[in-house]
């Protein structure tokens, strides 16, 4: 009888009920909230649902030594997490993005590249603010990249500069990517006048196939020679785009933008979520990171809009740019470009800004990778 009681007692000690804390319950509720936002609001469901479910998995209370937790060497989750810890997944995501991205809007109007560059100001503003709050330079650089609204880039950079903060930075970056439709419109309206919102832009010129093929090669050479440290992201971004535009590697392009990016998205979302174990995630630093990430994202959006207004001072009346596309300088593709379209249509139902906004939007993807390379170059 005593043996049975001891066995039952031992069994109880191994259950999640016996090891549950308030922090575990809180993180599980946050994970359910992420899933709800993905399903009900349809905010980046491909990201929020894997991350949310990962949070639930990662916060099931475990008895020490079971070798199933993500931070226990050799466990299945730990092995899958190596792709995040070592920065393997983000370049693969970038290859898929390149294979599904049409750079025609940017090629036809190269000055839109400047808007994507201006939006990266939010990254360096958050970097300065993080230093002011006492973060180490490496951690400050990793936190700042959240302003680019690019989850893979944030993971890539934080895995190298601040691995201890990777979970909080990744969740923050993906959260603000999902909240693009909620955060950006008020900022866009605040910094523009009604007259500016009604500006109609000239239709983009047609881009030849030759230009589309040359662009990824020239783009790689120009960016990688400036910031070689960004090569894993930039190289696979432009490689994926060449697969798409060459016309002779259709199967490879379809694999990169289809099954491959889907598999990697599942793995990166799930393992990022699992890594948010309560004892490691619920720290003062996590709250500061979310606050700095929000500030970075707001500054990036405002910088893009305001930069367009400055550009318009030097452009002739027929060539002016609608400042509402300035928000799309962040690299949340194509969500921020859709926001430009939606807000523009609120003031003129015939003024379609989507294709124009895609120019700075894809420029933002390149810009965030370049910014990551710059930070990695002088902070490593």
Image: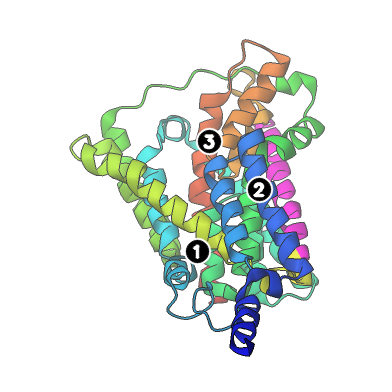
Question: What secondary structure characterizes most of the magenta part?
Answer: helix
Mark 1, residue position = 156
**Magenta highlight range:** 287-315
> What is the secondary structure assignment of the residue under circle 2?
helix
> In the image, 276: left or right of 83?
right
Quadrant including the N terminus: bottom right
Residue 162, percent from left and from top: 60, 74
Q: Which residue does the numbered mark 2 point to in the structure image?
A: 34
Dot 3 or dot 2: first in sequence order is: 2
Image quadrant of residue 187? top right
Q: Disc 3, disc 2: CB below 8 Å?
A: no
Q: Mark 2 against mark 1, which lies toward the viewer?
A: 2
Which residue has dot 3 on it? Answer: 334
Secondary structure of the residue carrying tag 3 is loop
Point out residue 212 in the picture as x, y percentages from the top left corner. Answer: 32, 35
Give yes or no for residue 3 being in the magenta stretch.
no
Q: Nearer the viewer, residue 209 or 181?
A: 181
- For the point 61% across and 24% down, the residue is 341
Marks 1 and 3, the one that precedes in the sequence: 1
Is 335 placed above or below 223 here? above
Lower position in the chain sequence, tag 2 or tag 1: 2
Name the front one of labels 3 and 2: 2
Residue 85, given in percent of the width and then of the height, sits at: 49, 71
Q: Residue furthest bottom?
A: 2
User: Which residue is drawn at the image coordinates 51% and 32% (left, top)?
Assistant: 358
Residues packed near mark 2 inside 10 Å, few (<14), some (14 to 19) or many (20 plus): many
């Amino acid at each position: 009888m005593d043996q049975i009681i001891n066995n039952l007692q031992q069994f109880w000690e191994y259950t999640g009920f016996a090891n549950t804390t308030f922090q575990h319950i809180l993180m599980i509720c946050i994970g359910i909230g992420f899933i709800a936002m993905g399903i009900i609001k349809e905010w980046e469901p491909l990201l929020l649902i894997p991350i949310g479910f990962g949070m639930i998995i990662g916060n099931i209370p475990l008895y020490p030594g079971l070798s199933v937790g993500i931070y226990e060497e050799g466990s299945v989750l730990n092995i899958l997490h190596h792709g995040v810890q070592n920065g393997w997944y983000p370049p693969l995501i970038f290859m898929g993005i390149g294979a599904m991205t049409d750079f025609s809007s940017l090629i036809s109007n190269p000055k839109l590249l400047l808007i994507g560059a201006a939006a990266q100001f939010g990254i360096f503003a958050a970097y300065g603010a993080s230093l002011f709050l006492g973060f180490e330079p490496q951690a400050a650089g990793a936190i700042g990249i959240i302003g680019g609204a690019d989850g893979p880039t944030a993971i890539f950079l934080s895995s190298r500069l601040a691995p201890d903060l990777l979970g909080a930075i990744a969740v923050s970056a993906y959260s603000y990517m999902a909240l693009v439709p909620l955060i950006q419109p008020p900022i866009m309206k605040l910094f523009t006048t009604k007259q500016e919102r009604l500006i109609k832009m000239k239709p983009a010129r047609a881009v030849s196939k030759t230009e589309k093929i040359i662009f990824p090669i020239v783009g790689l050479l120009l960016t990688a020679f400036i910031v070689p440290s960004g090569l894993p992201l930039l190289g696979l971004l432009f490689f994926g785009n060449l697969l798409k535009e060459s016309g002779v590697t259709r199967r490879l392009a379809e694999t990169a933008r289809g099954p491959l990016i889907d598999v990697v998205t599942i793995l990166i979302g799930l393992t990022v979520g699992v890594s948010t174990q309560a004892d490691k995630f619920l720290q003062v630093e996590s709250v500061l990171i979310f606050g700095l990430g929000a500030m970075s994202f707001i500054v990036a959006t405002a910088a893009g809009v305001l930069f367009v207004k400055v550009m318009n001072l030097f452009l002739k009346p027929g060539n002016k740019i609608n400042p509402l596309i300035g928000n799309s300088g962040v690299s949340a593709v194509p969500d921020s470009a859709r926001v430009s379209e939606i807000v523009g249509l609120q003031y003129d139902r015939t003024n379609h800004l989507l294709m124009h906004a895609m120019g700075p939007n894809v420029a933002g993807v390149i810009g965030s990778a370049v910014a990551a390379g710059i930070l990695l170059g002088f902070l490593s």
